[in-house]
């Protein structure tokens, strides 16, 4: 009650300041308030049954965290901190999370060189007073640092320490973040949801009932997507639906299978009475989507047309999804797309954790593949071959077509 009484007017002040565009001065204005919040937290020992999880990785990693959040939600309210407003909009609709926050951990580079524990907390108080205030008002019993980058780990752990969260848990590492943690997890070699489920041991739980991914798509979005499909496939509603996702965010070693290979697969599917939807978003996906879909009949280029949730609705209706290793793979698994074919090159195919029979992984035969074996973002080395992405280019369209013929 004390916190709510203090917090309500502060949140109103915060909204007013942002409306009048004083964001650049907010750390000066709110520093005394964040210090006051920290001092008050020291004399309020009663903790709500809430757990705060931070994850500064991509959408796929947050999707893989679902079994952990689901297991914790049986006993606690689970809140989530992400690093983009887009992710807030996506995961706010998931009932497993009570509240989803956005904290811009990439706003400052001041933590990359920080080696002092007390200065790290001081920097959090200085640069993130409003975010700290939000965390303070929620009165957490425990915090889990799931970030993948060492320097954002420092920010996340220091923020939890500044908010006086009594129990802070994270992965064992050699960075400053380690000094803020009360408990650490050593199982770095685990992949998929199993990596995150290790945190349950810190809450007296040995294992979760299920490692299955799940993503909720609301009924309104589902209805809208079905109407959209009916309009797009007018007079051809009996056709099967295939989703091809030829893009993906840039990495040190690209994960994009050549667009001309996807086009050959699309042509094969169209000949077998499929309607092909080519999906993607962002500038990095625009070119491959166009190269795959241009000039093909019974093929729709949906680049930039669907939100992440709408894409989930489309995948739940699709007969097959063919994709590079991106977050779409985990989304397709979470909404239980009927069949899933994934092309892997530099990344580890075991990141996709599933027991379903209609999930097929196409991998390279090169000995160096995969060059990224760990889910934790350790420094990734550039491809050793003069012809970059050789592991992906060695995978032929005929390998994908063979799977379709044999299994679908």
Image (cartoon, rainbow, N blue to C red):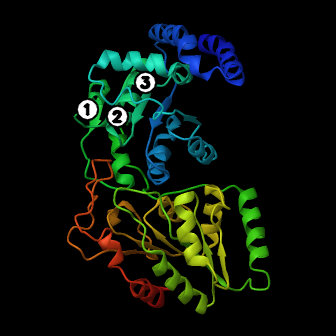
Asked whether 249 or 336 is in front, the reply is: 249
Using the numbered discs, state the Cα–Cα distance from disc 1 to disc 2 in whole angstroms: 8 Å
Determine contact: label 1, label 2, CB under 8 Å.
Answer: yes
Using the numbered discs, state the Cα–Cα distance from disc 1 to disc 3 in whole angstroms: 15 Å
Which residue position holds label 1? 175
Which of the two labelled residues, at mark 3 and mark 2, occupies the earlier sequence position? 2
Quadrant the N terminus occupies:
top right
Determine contact: label 3, label 2, CB under 8 Å.
Answer: no
- Residue 143 numbered mark, or none: none
Disc 2 element: helix
Using the numbered discs, state the Cα–Cα distance from disc 3 to disc 2 in whole angstroms: 13 Å
Instruction: Estimate how packed mark 2 is, as few (under 14), some (14 to 19) or many (20 or more) residues with alpha carbons within 10 Å.
Output: many
Disc 3 element: helix
Q: Position of residue 370 (x, y in %)?
A: 27, 65
Asked whether 307 or 261 is in front, the reply is: 261
Q: Position of residue 130 (x, y in %)?
A: 56, 21
- Vertical comparison of 215 with 362: above or below: above
Which of the two labelled residues, at mark 1 and mark 3, occupies the earlier sequence position? 3
- Residue 151 numbered mark, or none: 2
Camera-side mark, 3 or 2 = 2
- Vertical comparison of 198 with 47: above or below: below
Which residue position holds label 3? 159
The residue positioned 35% from the left and 73% from the top of the image is 392
Q: Position of residue 381 (x, y in %)?
A: 25, 55
The residue positioned 32% from the left and 15% from the top of the image is 118
Q: Position of residue 15 (x, y in %)?
A: 69, 22
Can you tell which quarter of the image residue 146 is in?
top left
Disc 1 element: loop
The residue positioned 74% from the left and 85% from the top of the image is 236
Which of the two labelled residues, at mark 1 and mark 2, occupies the earlier sequence position? 2
């Amino acid at each position: 009650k004390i916190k709510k009484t203090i917090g309500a007017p502060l949140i109103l002040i915060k909204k007013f300041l942002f409306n009048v565009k004083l964001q650049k001065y907010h750390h000066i204005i709110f520093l005394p308030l964040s210090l006051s919040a920290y001092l008050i937290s020291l004399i309020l020992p009663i903790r709500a049954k809430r757990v705060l999880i931070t994850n500064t990785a991509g959408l796929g990693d947050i999707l893989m965290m679902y079994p952990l959040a689901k297991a914790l939600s049986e006993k606690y309210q689970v809140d989530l901190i992400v690093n983009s407003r887009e992710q807030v909009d996506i995961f706010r609709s998931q009932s497993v999370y009570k509240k989803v926050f956005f904290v811009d951990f990439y706003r400052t580079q001041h933590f990359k060189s920080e080696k002092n524990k007390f200065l790290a907390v001081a920097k959090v108080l200085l640069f993130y007073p409003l975010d700290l205030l939000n965390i303070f008002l929620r009165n957490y019993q425990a915090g889990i640092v799931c970030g993948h980058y060492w320097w954002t780990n420092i920010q996340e752990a220091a923020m939890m320490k500044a908010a006086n969260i009594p129990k802070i848990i994270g992965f064992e590492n050699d960075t400053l973040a380690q000094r803020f943690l009360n408990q650490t997890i050593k199982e770095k070699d685990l992949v998929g949801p199993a990596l995150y489920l290790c945190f349950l041991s810190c809450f007296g739980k040995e294992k979760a009932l299920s490692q299955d991914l799940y993503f909720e798509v609301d009924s309104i979005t589902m209805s809208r997507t079905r109407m959209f499909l009916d309009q797009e496939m007018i007079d051809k509603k009996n056709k099967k639906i295939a989703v091809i996702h030829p893009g993906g965010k840039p990495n040190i070693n690209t994960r994009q299978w050549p667009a001309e290979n996807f086009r050959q697969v699309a042509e094969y599917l169209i000949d077998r009475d499929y309607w092909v939807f080519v999906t993607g978003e962002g500038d990095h996906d625009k070119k491959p989507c166009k190269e795959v879909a241009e000039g093909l009949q019974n093929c729709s280029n949906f680049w930039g047309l669907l939100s992440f949730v709408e894409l989930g609705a489309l995948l739940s209706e699709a007969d097959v999804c063919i994709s590079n290793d991106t977050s779409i793979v985990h989304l397709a698994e979470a909404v239980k797309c009927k069949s899933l074919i994934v092309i892997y090159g530099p990344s580890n195919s075991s990141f996709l954790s599933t027991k379903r029979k209609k999930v097929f992984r196409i991998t390279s035969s090169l000995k160096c593949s995969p060059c990224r074996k760990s889910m934790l973002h350790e420094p990734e080395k550039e491809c050793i071959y003069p012809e970059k992405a050789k592991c992906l280019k060695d995978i032929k369209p005929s390998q994908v077509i063979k799977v379709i013929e044999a299994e679908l």
